Amino acid sequence: MVELPPLGAHVSAAGGAAAAIGRGVELGCTALQIFVKSPNQWRARPLPAAAAAEFRAARAASPIGPVVAHAAYLINLAAPPGETRERSLAALADELGRGAALGLDALVVHPGAHLGAGAEGGLVRVAAALDEVLAAVPAGAPRLLLEITAGQGTVLGSRLEELARIVELAACGERLGVCLDTCHAFAAGYPLHEAAGHEALLAELDRLLGLARLGAIHLNDSQGACGSRRDRHANIGEGEIGTAAFRRLLRDERLRRVPMLLETPLGDDGAGHARDLATLRRLAGDVRLSGRGRRAARRAG
Ligand SMILES: [Zn+2]
């Protein structure tokens, strides 16, 4: 019998966060990623206490373990002083508060874009922004995970050295973790499609940040080639990364406790995640699908 890492997908929280648990259970997930508010808007109505309680109860009654949230795409922690920076800090603090109310394990955020200020200047701004936000965040808030990026334009965080630099610069560095997105890392130039690339990436992660900081992995194949800097997710086995890389990640003992989450296309029939989860379980060597997972996989064809 193979022990799988917590495995799941980013699911919609339409109808409330508790509804996301139902969607995850239907897919046979043991981990989940959600948005705690609309990712394309700055503001959102406050989270009602009843909705948070409903979510906690649904989660407790489910086989779902770790739940992480992905922060709004509008947030730019590297923005210069001004309206975008103010809004970004307020939005991140609000999302951490929502995550605390829901009892989430982590909140994934992109480091930001330096917009011409240069990488080092941008990283200094990100660290200062994180310190400002985390200083005001109550205990029990989810751990903040800096996600590796594909490195398009002036986007920061496409090298592990940059994520490590933020941790080094921030006074709150010990509270920060990282999220490894396979599509982003591959597009940024990490050759995950090769066994040597997998080993080198984990060794570098351990050396620069410590493996304990790895709080989540986004499992996405990549439409773009290695080093293309294109952030285009593909379904598992249908991109340039290929299935062998996902088998290595799923079977790596060092990653056994790290939640692994799909952010792949749903497809015209909406069953992309069910298919990808079935593929991942097969790659991991787990033939004992749960009843619900097996039904979902069969429906997905
Ligand atoms: Zn991602």
Image: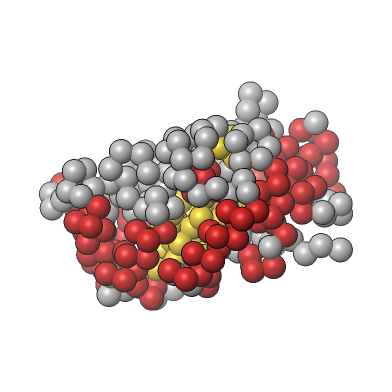
Residue 181 screen position, x and y as percent: 51, 50
Q: Is residue 200 above or below residue 41?
A: below
Indicate left or right for 124 with 98 as reference: left
Q: Is residue 154 toward the left or the right of residue 49 in the image?
A: left
Relative to 145, does residue 224 appear above or below in the rendering? above
Q: Which quarter of the image is occupied by the C terminus?
A: top right
Instruction: Evaluate whether residue 181 shows in this view.
Output: yes
Eyeballing the image, is 14 above or below 268? below
Left or right: 95 as drawn, with respect to 8: left
Q: Position of residue 61 (x, y in %)?
A: 69, 62
Identify which residue is drawn at 83% across, 41% down: 295
Rendering quarter of residue 95: bottom left
Image quadrant containing the N terminus? bottom right
In this rendering, the count of numbered labels is 0
Q: Residue 154: name its quadrant.
A: top left
Furthest residue toward front: 196
**Rendered location of residue 53, percent (x, y):** 54, 62
The residue nearer to you, when weighing 279 against 94, is: 279
The residue sitting at 44% across, 69% down in the picture is 209
Q: Nearer the viewer, residue 260 or 10?
A: 260
> Left or right: 21 with respect to 38?
right
* Image location (x, y in percent) of residue 93: 31, 60
Q: Is residue 129 visible?
A: no
Residue at horizontal 45 percent and vertical 62 percent from the top: 178
